[in-house]
Amino acid sequence: MNKSLQLSLDHTLLVWSNQKVLNPIHIKKAKGVNLYDDQGKRYIDFSSQLMNVYIGHGRQEITEVVRNQMTSLSYVCPPFTTETRGLLVEKLASITPDHINKTFFALSGAESNENAIILARLYSGKHKIIKHYRFYQGATMGAISAGGGPRKNHINNQQAPNFIHFENPYFYRCPWYSFSFEECGDRTIKNLENTLLYEGPDNIAAILLEDESGTSGCIEYPPYYLKKVNNLCKKYDMLLTID
Ligand SMILES: Cc1ncc(COP(=O)(O)O)c(C=O)c1O
């Protein structure tokens, strides 16, 4: 076996995996959409790794920009700011919808969800967060509690409190045996509203949704589903956060 593959297996805890039967692909280099293992075998990276390498692998102009930044200034702690950060947040404010003009920097999806939950609670003064069951938000304590999928139960059943779940609008396995995609969506909305009323809208800070369920099953939303969820948020004075 390749030496660095053996070292990785000996000294790394790999996530979401049975450690005893692991056989990870050992990648040596990558260019564009292609990954190559140490035998030269090519893999096409259809998912851009964890949906985070959309611009492709090995872009030299990006390497150059990173190298220049590291040479002139490699780190400042959070209360400081820099010219590069100013330019980046201006750009983000210009391309996001008008009411979004501030950026919070995080290092992962889980961390950004943790902070979205904290901000929603601080802003609203309320504590409950409502979520779909089939949903993945990350592997930190709050994010894994928020994610309603059963796969977390094998590893962690001691969940953080005040995360409430409701059914996805999952027409293929519709819990209400709906006859159409739209009907499944409308019944899900009704189920959501009932859940809100049972839980008490005065206790609910936010509804937290994926823009569409991805790693938890690729469940497509019916037409206008998010709009209808947003209408409920307005009706009961709750925030809507999209992951
Ligand atoms: C919708 C969604 N949110 C959050 C995460 C967690 O991101 P990270 O692994 O960067 O913590 C994922 C990861 O798959 C995701 O699909």
Image (cartoon, grey):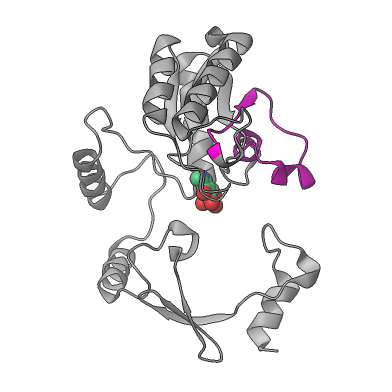
Q: Which residues are magenta?
A: 142-171
Considering every residue shown, the one lying at the far right of the view is 20
| Residue in the image at 44% along x and 45% along y | 106
Q: Quadrant of residue 3?
A: bottom right
Q: Is residue 150 left or right of residue 181?
A: right
Q: Is residue 227 above or below residue 181?
A: above
> The N terminus appears in which quarter of the rendering?
bottom right
The residue depicted at 29 percent of the width and 69 percent of the height is 62
Quadrant (top left/top right/bottom left/bottom right) for the C terminus: top left
Question: Is 30 rendered above or below residue 178?
Answer: below
User: Residue at image x 40%, y 29%?
Assistant: 226
Asked if the magenta segment contains residue 159, the reply would be: yes
Q: Looking at this view, is 63 or 113 the one in front?
A: 113
- Is residue 148 a member of the stretch shown in magenta? yes
Say whether residue 155 is left or right of residue 122. right
- Above or below residue 198? Residue 228 is below
Vertically, is 196 above or below 154?
above
Q: Residue furthest bottom?
A: 39
Query: x and y percent of residue 191 in the render?
Result: 57, 19
